[in-house]
Image (tube, rainbow, N blue to C red):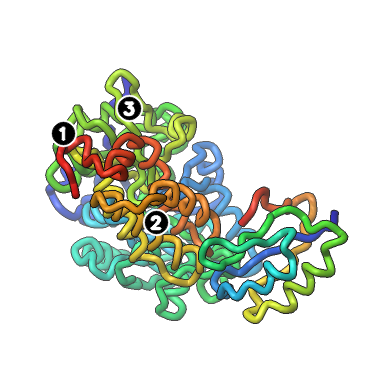
Amino acid sequence: MSDASAARLLAGPPTTAGTESLEDHVARLGERPAGDDETIELLRRTRLRGRGGGAFPALRKWRAVAGGSRPPAVLVNGVEAEPMSQKDRLLMQVRPHLVIDGAFIAAEAVGARRIVVCVGRDHRSSSDALTAALRARSDRPCAVDIVKVPAGYVAGEESALVQYVERRVAKPTSGPRPFVAGIGGAPTLVHNVETLAHVGLLARMGAEWFAAVGAGAAGTTLITLSGAGLHGARVLEIAHGTTLQDAVAAAGGDEAAPAALLGGHSGRWTALDPHNPLPLDPGSLQEAGLSLGAGVVHLLEPGGCAVDETSRMLAYMAEQSARQCGPCTFGLPAIAGAADRVARGRAESHDLSRLSRWAGMVRGRGACHHPDGAAVLAESSLAVFAADWRSHASGAGCITRAERVA
Amino acid sequence: MSRFVVEIDRIACDGRGLCAELLPEMISLDDWGFPIISGDPVPDSLLPMAQLAVDQCPLLALRLRAHTSSTPAAPGRH
């Protein structure tokens, strides 16, 4: 059985102890190694993937920017735009030096001339902790700037971050991808703060240590659990391959929760069956048509209404559109409107089939993946809770709440 | 089959719809008037109309991209 709680990023003082100082960090883990070709080799051996939701192989990104036309830049993504995720803020708050180690190591390894650290403007305590930690460092490989990014779901998308850094517009772009031409036109390595924290440990401890835990993928990953049985959100570090059921139990979540949303607002619902354990590693999840995304697990309350929850989330996704692309600007409000009518027991005659149709219609047709997220959320809910949606749509009311909604 | 695919800049596109009129074999409009574009290579016979659609887009949102075996056309539509 995999260890349901495996401390590596979160090893050391408990998270309740607050920010680990530079002195304590170095005493515990040693000085940070330099970044170089050996680091890139470590990425190859461990097959480290990004922890921002895209799960992109880190090696490919590093090689692409290192082999670019000009000296690259590194953009540290600590914006955590997914509202259901807390792991990045926690990491920046309690282990900022590990994140910074990873950023400095990456910058050295790819030959970067500039590091830009992006944090959420509203995330005061974690951005203050990271800012203070940066100030305490005397091992900067290049210029480091901190940019505070306004809240917004699409603001954390990598091309939106580059555009915000360049011209203070927090919207995705349709031009060359950041790894080709990003900040100041330089090939830009964009990494989530958790990914960089893993680099900080990996560079010290090596590939064998890294792969000593984890099944299906090497190492550990941070997940944020919320919903049934949990007050607020709980961040857990798990070894890859830990089952969803074990993770829920370790976090104190309600093990009778009938379903979970994996991945947040752009994620997928899945029914939870205690007799069908779901290993949390990219391969097993992919086989089940799922993904952890930015590591979000949100549990449905027993007796909770997924139609209602999904409808509210779709309204949020529609509201968060950057309104740059037609299918997203018009499609997401249409989807949210139909979902809202159905949830309230005021469905028009074709609302359910429209929901399906429109979700399929917007997928892949924006400059970024925001419409895809809403589409996937809608489609998974319609599939997993088909009976619920039909009951709401027919006016028969909510199955789980056993009451008429209209 | 030519070596070209029709590509669109989704941000520049404003849903005018000229492209769907000029190249209905490869471009249709969604429920909000925005183009749904086939990712298949443009057949040789349609290349002149594809070029015309690119040229006539008021927002210059379309282009024809040459694809080689290393950059295959995106399957399906977009």
Q: For numbered disc 3, what is the local secondary structure?
A: loop
Q: CA distance from mark 3 to mark 2?
A: 33 Å
Q: Describe residue B5's horizontal placement relative to residue A130 as left or right.
A: right
Residue A329 vertical placement versus A315 (above, below): below
| Quadrant of residue B52 within the rendered picture | bottom right
Mark 3 neighbour class, 10 Å CA radius: few under 14, some 14 to 19, many 20 or more: many
Residue A366 vertical placement versus A372 (above, below): below
Residue A220 vertical placement versus B20 (above, below): above
Tell me which label, 3 or 1, sits earlier in the chain: 3
Q: Describe residue B50's horizontal placement relative to residue A215 as left or right.
A: right
Please name the residue that numbered disc 1 is placed on: A252
Please name the residue that numbered disc 3 is placed on: A243
Residue A70 vertical placement versus A56 (above, below): below
Q: Quadrant of the N terminus of chain A?
A: top left
The location of residue B6, given as percent across then percent down, is: 71, 63
Give the residue drawn at x 17%, y 43%.
A404
Nearest the eye: A390 or A32: A390
Give the residue drawn at x 39%, y 47%.
A352
Mark 2 vs mark 1, foreground winner is 2
Q: In the image, which disc is placed on residue A156?
A: none
Q: Total label count? A: 3
Nearest the eye: A324 or A118: A324
Please name the residue that numbered disc 2 is placed on: A335
The residue under label 1 is which amino acid type?
A: Gly
